[in-house]
Amino acid sequence: MYTDGACSGNPGPGGYGVVLLYKGHRKELSQGYKNTTNNRMEMMAVIKGLEAVKEPCAVDVYSDSKYLVDSINKGWAARWRDNNWMRNKKEKALNVDLWGKLLSLLDKYQVSFYWVKGHAEIEENERCDFLATEALKNSDLLEDTQPT
């Protein structure tokens, strides 16, 4: 699974793009939102991609978001959840609605996250960027329920 999020302004209109590849099959997903952030769209891409997976399986997620990849791989997001969504004793974690959804989905699958450099001519990452950017331009933008 390749994922990307985009935002025009931060916050502003945003979108996500997903390319799912499995045994010669390909599925692309995208959607735009009226008022959101880039980080939320990066996370939404993975959530929507995992929600589209039909059966429990191993999933490799490729993202150009260090925020997303590091938050999962370094255990930050799980630690925030375990600490009642606090990053430390004084700072609340952001995007807790999406982190909660994502962490729940990760329990269903064997997911490995890999960071890829954005705009580095990685074909599927470039395609996700295109899908996300086009999605934020559409007229059917959804409301982001909890933009931060």
Image (cartoon, grey):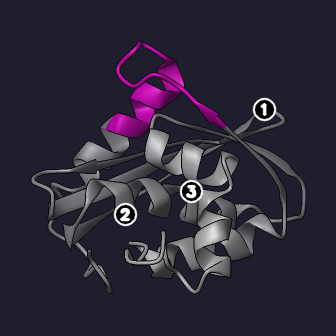
Q: CA distance from mark 3 to mark 2?
A: 10 Å
Q: CA distance from mark 1 to mark 3?
A: 20 Å
Mark 1 vs mark 3: in front: 3
Instruction: Classify residue 66 as left or right of residue 39.
Output: right
Mark 2 vs mark 1: in front: 2
Q: Which residue is mark 3?
A: 46
The C terminus is located in which quarter?
A: bottom left
Is label 3 in a helix, a strand or a loop? helix
What is the crowding at mark 3: few (fewer than 14 residues within 10 Å), some, or many (at least 20)?
Answer: many
The percent coordinates of residue 90 (x first, y second) are 38, 77
* Label located before the other in sequence (1 or 3): 1
The question of residue 65 being in magenta is answered with no
Quadrant of res 31: bottom left
Q: Is residue 136 above or below residue 83?
A: above
Instruction: Classify residue 139 as left or right of residue 97.
Output: left
Q: Of residues 67 and 101, which is closer to you in this image?
A: 67
Disc 3 residue type? Val
* Residue at x-position 84% and y-position 35%: 23
Q: Which residue is mark 1?
A: 24
Question: Can the viewer see residue 4?
Answer: yes
Disc 2 residue type? Arg
* Label located before the other in sequence (3 or 2): 2
Disc 1 residue type? Gly
* Residue at x-position 35% and y-position 36%: 129
The percent coordinates of residue 84 (x first, y second) are 58, 86
Quadrant of res 102: bottom right
Q: Which mark is residue 40?
A: 2
Which residues are the magenta region? Answer: 114-129
Q: Is residue 96 above or below residue 41?
A: below
